Amino acid sequence: MNNLPEVFSQQDVQELPFFFIVGRGRSGTTLLQMMLNAQGKVTIPLESKFILHLQGKYEGRSFTSPLEIRQFCEDLYTNRKFRLFWNVEKEALITFLSGQLPVRGFPEICKLIYAYAPTPFPFHNLCMLGDKNPFYSLYIPALLRTFPEARFVHLIRDARANVWSHYKAFGKKNAVHMASQWKLYNQRVEAAKREKPDRFHTLRYEDLVSNPEETLRSLCTFLNLAYSPAMLDYHLTADKWAKESSYLNLKHHLAIGKKVSPAKAGGWKEGLTSFEVRCIEHVAYEELLRYGYPVEKQSLASSALLYWAMGKIRFHIQHLLIQKVLFSMPFSLRKHIFNGLSLFFDARYTGSGTEQA
């Protein structure tokens, strides 16, 4: 069941401003998403890459017939996270979008889908649409082609805490690889920020959990939203959503139903080895300084060169295959790849909360 009132027209939806929450995953982006959802006049559905996935095929196209809507929805549902987690029944969505014809273009149909998506957070007088997707940090220029007036919320977390959070969520990995990912994501956001500084608001995870009200009030001013005390009680509804959602019930989201606490911010000091800390600080030294985190310049011993090389090789392979190749190939080819991967990996997302995504 979607939350759009019957009197909400396509024109109403098209006039809603759009914003994106970006930053490296495990930086508190889901926490911030839930806090903003609890504000009452904004909706941010669960994570999906469908804008990027469909942009190449549908950018610049309008929709004038039910047949075009059906083809668009068939393509939309090749995106695994949308299909499995948004809880939008395909035929119901086709009926809804067909009732909005004609739809002027790709930005308009995306906004209609975001507004239509169900959410357990009650909203009144919807005034803004949002998206939370760390992966979009790498594609901000592409997002601005579709939503040229969009705003961006850049969420930063200490690189050492970020790597430690990845370890806890997904298992221990090469610290150089993880720190290089953190650095890349934030560098990409900073590059976009230099082009359009007035479109970006930067906040730190540590400030969000230690002083949430002041941090959220500043963010609401940037987004032209009214601050609501309900934003601090996000966990009451997020807990219910997490129990009902196969995505939020995954291992790495199990804390989302708990009240915000600064206690976790320094967990990396006990969790990481001194060697891992040196590797992370060596990779991310300049960025850690820029964002105000205490750090010392580190040099690595020759005995660490193999570990360093393996981390860098893995980072560059992942960056090439996923971030360069996959979303640069024609949609028709990528769709077949996604369909093939779904045959093997869908069960990981629809099983118990012990599985990882």
Image: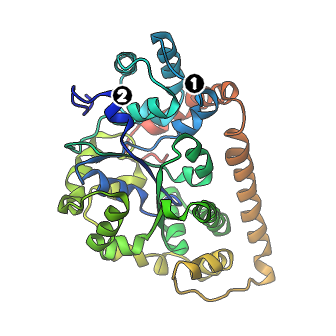
**Amino acid tagged 1:** Arg
C-alpha span from label 1 to label 2: 23 Å
Among the 4 quarters of the image, the one containing residue 211: bottom left
Give percent across and percent down for residue 162.
51, 68
Q: At 33% across and 40% down in the image, what residue appears? A: 245
Give percent across and percent down for residue 247.
39, 43
Is residue 224 placed above or below 324 in the rendered structure?
below
Q: Which callout, 1 or 2, points to the residue nearer the camera?
A: 1
Q: Is residue 84 visible from the viewing direction of this image?
A: yes
Give percent across and percent down for residue 212.
29, 70
Q: Which label belongs to residue 88?
A: 2
Element type at mark 2: loop
Q: Nearer the viewer, residue 248 or 22?
A: 22
Q: At 51% across and 15% down in the image, what residue appears? A: 68
Q: Which residue is mark 1?
A: 61
Q: Earlier in the sequence, mark 1 or mark 2?
A: 1
- Point out the image quarter for the N terminus: top left
Q: Is residue 117 visible from the viewing direction of this image?
A: no
Element type at mark 1: loop
Q: How many marks?
A: 2
Is residue 24 placed above or below 339 in the rendered structure?
below
Q: Along the horizontal axis of the image, is 341 left or right of 7? A: right
Q: At 68% across and 86% down in the image, what residue appears? A: 298
Q: Along the horizontal axis of the image, is 282 left or right of 88? A: right
Q: Which label belongs to residue 294?
A: none
**Amino acid tagged 2:** Val
Give percent across and percent down for residue 314.
72, 57
Q: Nearer the viewer, residue 148 or 30?
A: 148
Asked if labels 2 and 1 touch by Cβ distance under 8 angstroms, the answer is no
